Amino acid sequence: MHVLILGGTTEARRLAELLAAPPAAALPGLRVTNSLAGRVTAPRLPPGDVRVGGFGGAEGLAAWLREHTVDALIDATHPFAKKISFNAAHAAATAHVPLLALRRPGWVPVAGDDWHETHSLEGAAKLLPALGRRVFLTSGRMGLAAFAGLDELWFLMRSVDAPEPPHPARMEVLLDRGPFTLDGERQLLRRHAIDVVVTKDSGGAATAPKLTAAREAGLPVVVVRRPPVPEAVRVVAEPEQALDWIRDVQGSGLFPESG
Ligand code: NAP
């Protein structure tokens, strides 16, 4: 059985690790290919085969599925990677390959949070001047152009790789990748005298401590809500559930058993 995982997330890596470890590794004839977009210079590589780079749209992905006789497709990409998720839905339908989305749930505010929700980075940029002057920007290095005109604000921008222009004029870059600790986030907010935080609703535990630290410090947080997901695709939140789904596909006879 050949499983293709569209990855680039903690969950995708955790699933690949699960599939490589017993007893999942004992699934008959299981072969796993992990696909990465190639955005990060030195990605953390999951176990199993790894391919890097785009497929050439939904048609390219469908052709890849057929050519490499993929039996099950798992879209474990980031909740904000909208294009590849729609491509996966389209390609799975045309190539008749079962598809599962592995997607971590979004964050929900709790008592004491001061969240300001929007649906785009541009929307976040519009909200900022009324909320603070020293911004902790954690929405990633892509899309920084949305904040480029905000010359009166200062930004601390944290990302895995260095950003490219256009970006805000007054900006310090912090190269780092999660998981982050609550204590580390508290210190960071204090050290840089941050008075507002910007985040995408990425969900998950690895980058959530900034939300707790902001709540404790009474800071407003601009939360960019998720883009829509393809309809009619089954979604699970945990890698273990994806493993169960793979077992179901294997048991369903939807692919030729290699024995
Ligand atoms: P996107 O806008 O949905 O995808 C743009 C194009 O990149 C896709 O059309 C596809 O090219 C290629 N691509 C995306 N993910 C791929 C994958 N796993 N394997 C092969 N090709 C892929 O995605 P994005 O927002 O640029 O994100 C790119 C990757 O970074 C994703 O894999 C995602 O999991 C990861 N990531 C994204 C974010 C975020 O905030 N967006 C955060 C953390 C990690 P073709 O059309 O040529 O196939």
Image: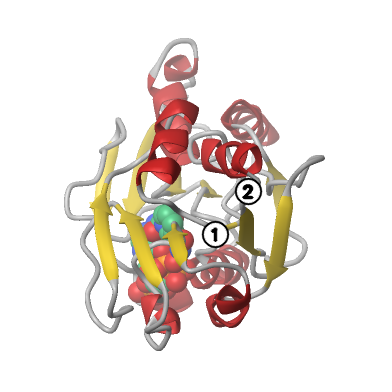
Residue 67 visible in the picture: no
Q: Label for residue 196?
A: 1
Q: How is the image coloured?
A: secondary structure
Q: Does the beta carbon at disc 1 come under 8 Å from ligand 1?
A: no
Of residues 206 and 153, which is closer to you in this image? 153
Give the x, y percent position of residue 219: 61, 51
Q: CA distance from mark 1 to mark 2?
A: 36 Å
Q: Quadrant of ligand 1?
A: bottom left
Of residues 237 and 159, which is closer to you in this image? 159
Q: Secondary structure at mark 1?
A: strand
**Crowding at label 2, few (<14), some or many (≥20) Cα neighbours within 10 Å?**
many
Give the x, y percent position of residue 91: 53, 68
**Crowding at label 1, few (<14), some or many (≥20) Cα neighbours within 10 Å?**
many
Give the x, y percent position of residue 129: 56, 78
Which residue: 66% across, 38% down?
237
The answer to which quarter of the image holds residue 63 is bottom left
Which residue: 37% across, 69% down?
154
Q: Label for residue 100?
A: 2
Residue 108 visible in the picture: yes
Of residues 251 and 136, which is closer to you in this image? 136
Q: Amino acid at mark 2?
A: Leu
